[in-house]
Image (cartoon, grey):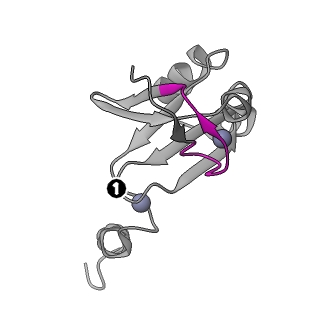
Amino acid sequence: MKDELGQCSVCKKEHTSTNVEVTPGVFIYVCSDCLEKAKDNFIWICTSCGKHFIRPKELVINRTKDPELKKAYMLCRDMQIIQGIDMCIACDPQGIVEFMEAKRPAAKC
Ligand SMILES: [Zn+2]
Ligand SMILES: [Zn+2]
């Protein structure tokens, strides 16, 4: 926890002294409005470019087919969670392309 005031990493509007650890050792500032949003939404923040993604928890849980992942999401349904991700579509289009290529079925088999 740091004491200085910083710009909220989620809305980029408010200044706040509240900060959360999104991945070990990485802290971001989050204003009270955005923390409030985190009650009903999962918030992911890209630690590489700073872009954030907000998805309603119910939607995420309903769409998750993986039972293990679903269980994990259910467990944090009542928590205010802001999670850091290493990269996103915006900051690594090449990585996403490679991911899609890998997914594409082989032309001849
Ligand atoms: Zn905010
Ligand atoms: Zn990014």
Q: Quadrant of residue 88?
A: bottom left
At 57% from the left and 14% from the top, the residue drawn is 75
Is the magenta region chiefly helix, strand or loop?
Answer: loop
Ligand 2 location (quadrant) = bottom left
**Closer-to-camera residue (13/26):** 13
Residue 64 forms part of the magenta stretch: no
Q: Quadrant of the N terminus?
A: top left
Q: Which residue is mark 1?
A: 48
Extent of the magenta region: 8-19
The x, y position of residue 74, in whole percent, is 61, 19
Residue at 37% x, 69% y is: 96
Residue 104 image point, x, y percent: 37, 74
Q: Secondary structure at mark 1?
A: loop
User: Residue type at mark 1?
Assistant: Ser
| Quadrant housing the C terminus | bottom left
Q: Is residue 11 magenta?
A: yes
- Looking at the rendering, which quadrant does residue 57 occupy? top right
Q: Residue at x 39, y 67 (%)?
A: 91
Vertical placement of residue 47 versus 78, above or below: below
**What residue is at 67 percent from the left and 15 percent from the top?**
78
Residue 89's place in the image compared with 3, above or below, is below
Out of 32 and 46, give the one closest to the viewer: 32
Percent x, y of residue 24: 28, 27
Residue 83 pos. (x, y %): 47, 35
Q: Is mark 1 within 8 Å of ligand 2?
A: yes
